[in-house]
Amino acid sequence: MKILIADKFQTSGVEALKQLGCDVEFHPDTTAETMKDVVAAANPDVLIVRGTKVNGAAIQAGEHLSLVIRAGAGVDSIDVSEASRRGVYVANCPGKNSVAVAEIAWGLILACDRRIPDQTTELRDGKWNKKEYSKANGLKGRTLGIVGTGQIGMEIADRGKAFGMNVIGWSRSLTPARAKQLGIGFCGSLNELAANSDVISVSVSANSETANLINAAFCSAMRPDAIFINTSRGSVVDHAALTKAIQEKRVRVGLDVFGNEPGGATGEFADPIVKLPGVYGTHHVGASTEQAQDAIAEEAVRIVKHLLETGEVCNCVNLAGKTPATSLLTVRHLNKPGVLAHVFDVIDAAQTNVEEMENIIYDGAHAACARIQLDNELTAEHLAKIRENPNVLGIDSSRI
């Protein structure tokens, strides 16, 4: 199996892939602009990237490409739709960077509360301004609102509890019972969370449902002088609405992610929000600790190892939740060559498409059972044609 690593990746991971017997090409300086050419030249079976964007053209360039692994959690930097159209799996490494992201979120929270970057800048400029920077609200006893109560959100929440904060949360799947189990307060809506939080931290996936999740209504509901942290993706926040809250409500903001980030590790960057007073930013490095990257590399290697051993892809994010199948064809048959070929010839003659299938082998490997999901139910004539094969033991067709 040929693997192209077109991004920075831990040396331990590169060596582990080689030990699996893989042919590994390592191009850590690949950019979004050069990705297509690098993929075309290497023609890998598997592409591994960390943060560099993989667009549709890059996916099309890989004649043998069957799997793209995102060495991280979010997959919005990959054209998943194009991968799905071309039958390319996309997998990620979720949960391996939770602690690292929580740590940078808390760095941003503390920076906002105590204005640490501003203090550092003035000290470097030779200014002593203790009078100004002695003004801080503090965190103990205040309320931390968690938007997105997955692994990252709960790591942030746990650290909030250690600071003596009250923690409340909201997510699309959170219930009062689950909130109680997590030891946090339940909010029935985003705006309720905004209105009741002194510090807000956002940790949700980037998708069509979360685009501009933090909108004008949310920002309008926020408390004056609140702290807002985003370590998820820039697309989650309406920056115009957030800018208004900064200017009118003196909201302080910590951002590790932005709406228009460069496609590679370096490049020109321009976002007017970072120039506003009370806004502190980092370079989308929430997951960039050695601990997190070691764990992510191990998970990427595990995905490849499992693929080699079983042909299955772990952590796949682009499998269909529901297919167009309307009928289930069940064929019990002797485990002999040509039986399934006969079944599929009949299905083809019926102009019916196979959506999903599995062939289960019974103990002793003398017989098997094929379960085939079809987009149309076969007629009685077609079922009779399948039964003509002497190695077919039984057949059943039912609506799904």
Image (tube, helix red, strand yellow):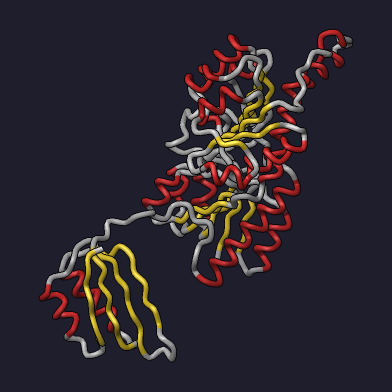
Say which of 195 and 236 sits in front: 195
Where residue 183 sits, quadrant-wise, is top right
Where residue 287 sits, quadrant-wise, is top right
Residue 272 visible at all: yes
Provide residue 283's location: percent of width, then percent of height: 67, 31
Provide residue 17's location: percent of width, then percent of height: 65, 63
Say which of 306 and 68 sits in front: 306
Answer above or below: position of 379 versus 194. below
Residue ranking furthest to the left: 381
Q: Which corner quadrant holds the N terminus?
A: bottom right
Where residue 334 sits, quadrant-wise, is bottom left
Answer above or below: position of 23 versus 339. above
Say which of 7 and 288 sits in front: 288
Answer above or below: position of 246 versus 211. above
Image position of 125 (left or right of 348): right
Residue at 17%, 86% in the rendered image:
388
Say which of 316 and 151 sits in front: 151
Residue 232 visible at all: no
Image position of 141 (left or right of 34): right
